[in-house]
């Protein structure tokens, strides 16, 4: 398999709607391509995987920092500044990475005193040994309350244990931010997120590449996958364009009253990919006004389900509840080939599983779920992925382009987040009182 496979024969889009939307889409694709070509604000995200100069610089920095006897990387950032990294890391390294691997990774995002305390204790333990940590503060704006607060708490620990603390700190931020100025004064290494790329589209900028590379993810393969699929996802030949087809599925279903998009992922380790996607769709489409300023309160609400776990908690609602959901099933091909033993005593409990691979059981559950959706006339499409950097790079680029296309179809700005700024501003006012 050469990466991502897209299927949508059950998306229940009427052919008349499909033709109408295709015509609209053709115009929008021209605008999107122009935006990308001119490196316009937001659209420039699509160009990022092609910027090999920047990724080479990140690789060099990783090589240099890996010589410092590093036992853990602590990523301090929130939202667009850490969700992509968590997604790629967990999808490829699994949720048990820190119990297994040499270089561990911790994420400090919200100002939850208990969880930051736990990270503090952990890094203190490392710093009391011969080993070191990397503290990577990632903030595009440079002034997000949670990130700066957490960073200061963790920097204090680093300063206490290492006189040469500056060489263990990397600051990733926009060029020209106030944080960049502070980092220069502190002699910290600086990586930049291009000003033209929004936080939730930044996973393939140094914001994601540096921490991922530090813990052994093959960032070059991630970028290669993204590059491979870009042309396909921008093609005007809609039949060959998975992003456009998926955006059409969502648009037509949304217009039929499906206000929720559920990403139903059949892989435990990919739950955080779902959370990354949640931010991407929610912040890009949830808008009070259209691009021309008309009040619409637009948006599609993303939810994440994990197969088969959530079949035991959400399936009743999905199959019996309101007709307000469009589902994308994500099938992920596992790496391990675990087999069920042939224990005679257990055979009467569940028939047909003895001696089978766990993945065969999962495939049966997956097929059964889809049949139930088809019987219940619940619209869905499907993505199939492999668990490797190349496939994930394709998937993430496909989703980013799809969300841009979908935002064009519903006529909202895919790249701003005015409501997020509102809460940030109010918080600053309260803290400064
Ligand atoms: O998408 C967004 O813009 C937000 O979710 C931001 O990523 C988040 O608020 C963090 O912002 P910053 O990277 O500026 O600290």
Image (cartoon, rainbow, N blue to C red):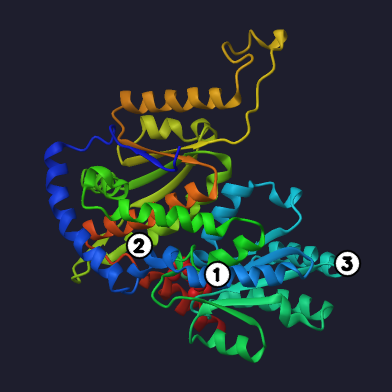
Q: Residues within 10 Å of mark 2 (few under 14, many from 20)?
A: many
In the rendered image of this protein, does residue 376 appear above or below residue 83? above
Mark 3, residue position: 129
Regarding residue 433, the answer to whether it shows in the image is no
| Quadrant in which residue 355 is drawn | top right
Mark 2, residue position: 284
Q: Is tag 2's residue or tag 3's residue first in the polypeptide sequence?
A: 3
Q: Residues within 10 Å of mark 3 (few under 14, many from 20)?
A: few
Quadrant in which the N terminus is drawn: top left
| Quadrant in which residue 117 is drawn | bottom right
Q: Position of residue 139 (x, y in %)?
A: 54, 75
- Foreground mark, 2 or 3, reads 3
In the rendered image of this protein, does residue 212 appear above or below residue 244? below
- Give the distance between the C-alpha atoms of the residues marked 1 and 2, in whole angstroms: 30 Å
Q: Position of residue 36 (x, y in %)?
A: 30, 68
x 65%, y 23%: residue: 339
- Helix, strand or loop for disc 1: helix
Mark 1, residue position: 56
Q: Position of residue 216 (x, y in %)?
A: 65, 57
- Give the distance between the C-alpha atoms of the residues marked 1 and 3, in whole angstroms: 32 Å
Q: Nearer the viewer, residue 56 or 320?
A: 56
- Helix, strand or loop for disc 3: loop
Quadrant in which the C terminus is drawn: bottom right
Q: Which mark is residue 287?
A: none
Q: Is tag 1's residue or tag 2's residue first in the polypeptide sequence?
A: 1
x 68%, y 61%: residue: 106
- Foreground mark, 1 or 3, reads 1
Q: Residues within 10 Å of mark 1 (few under 14, many from 20)?
A: few
């Amino acid at each position: 398999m050469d990466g991502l496979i897209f299927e949508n024969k059950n998306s229940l889009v009427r052919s008349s709607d499909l033709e109408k939307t295709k015509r609209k889409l053709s115009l929008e694709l021209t605008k999107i391509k122009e935006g990308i070509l001119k490196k316009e604000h937001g659209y420039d995200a699509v160009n990022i995987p092609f910027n090999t100069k920047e990724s080479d610089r990140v690789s060099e920095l990783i090589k240099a920092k890996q010589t410092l006897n590093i036992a853990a990387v602590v990523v301090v950032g929130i939202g667009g500044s850490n969700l992509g990294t968590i997604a790629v890391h967990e999808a490829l390294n699994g949720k048990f990475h820190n119990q297994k691997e040499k270089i561990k990774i911790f994420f400090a995002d919200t100002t939850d005193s208990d969880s930051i305390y736990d990270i503090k204790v952990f890094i203190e333990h490392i710093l009391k040994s011969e080993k070191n940590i990397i503290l990577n503060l990632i903030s595009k704006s440079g002034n997000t309350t949670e990130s700066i607060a957490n960073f200061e708490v963790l920097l204090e620990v680093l300063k206490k244990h290492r006189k040469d603390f500056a060489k263990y700190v990397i600051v990733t931020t926009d060029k020209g931010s106030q944080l960049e100025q502070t980092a220069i004064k502190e002699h910290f290494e600086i990586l930049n997120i291009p000003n033209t790329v929004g936080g939730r589209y930044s996973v393939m900028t140094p914001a994601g590449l540096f921490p991922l590379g530090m813990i052994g993810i093959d960032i070059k393969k991630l970028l290669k996958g993204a590059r491979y699929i870009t042309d396909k996802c921008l093609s005007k030949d809609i039949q060959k364009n998975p992003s456009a087809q998926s955006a059409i599925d969502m648009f037509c279903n949304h217009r039929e009253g499906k206000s929720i998009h559920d990403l139903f992922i059949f892989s435990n380790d990919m739950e955080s990919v779902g959370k990354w996607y949640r931010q991407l769709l929610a912040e890009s489409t949830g808008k009070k006004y259209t691009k021309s300023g008309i009040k619409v309160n637009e948006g599609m609400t993303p939810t994440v389900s994990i197969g088969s776990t959530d079949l035991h908690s959400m399936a009743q609602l999905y199959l019996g509840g309101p007709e307000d959901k469009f589902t994308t099933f994500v099938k992920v091909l596992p790496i391990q080939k675990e087999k069920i033993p042939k224990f005679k005593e257990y055979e009467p409990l569940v028939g047909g599983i003895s001696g089978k691979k766990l993945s065969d059981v999962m495939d049966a559950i997956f097929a059964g779920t889809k049949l139930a959706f088809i019987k219940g006339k619940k619209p869905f499409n499907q993505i199939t992925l492999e668990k490797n950097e190349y496939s994930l790079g394709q998937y993430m680029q496909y989703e980013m382009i799809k969300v841009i296309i979908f935002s064009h179809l519903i006529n909202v700005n895919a790249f701003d987040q005015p409501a997020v700024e509102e809460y940030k501003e109010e918080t600053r006012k309260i803290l400064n009182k």
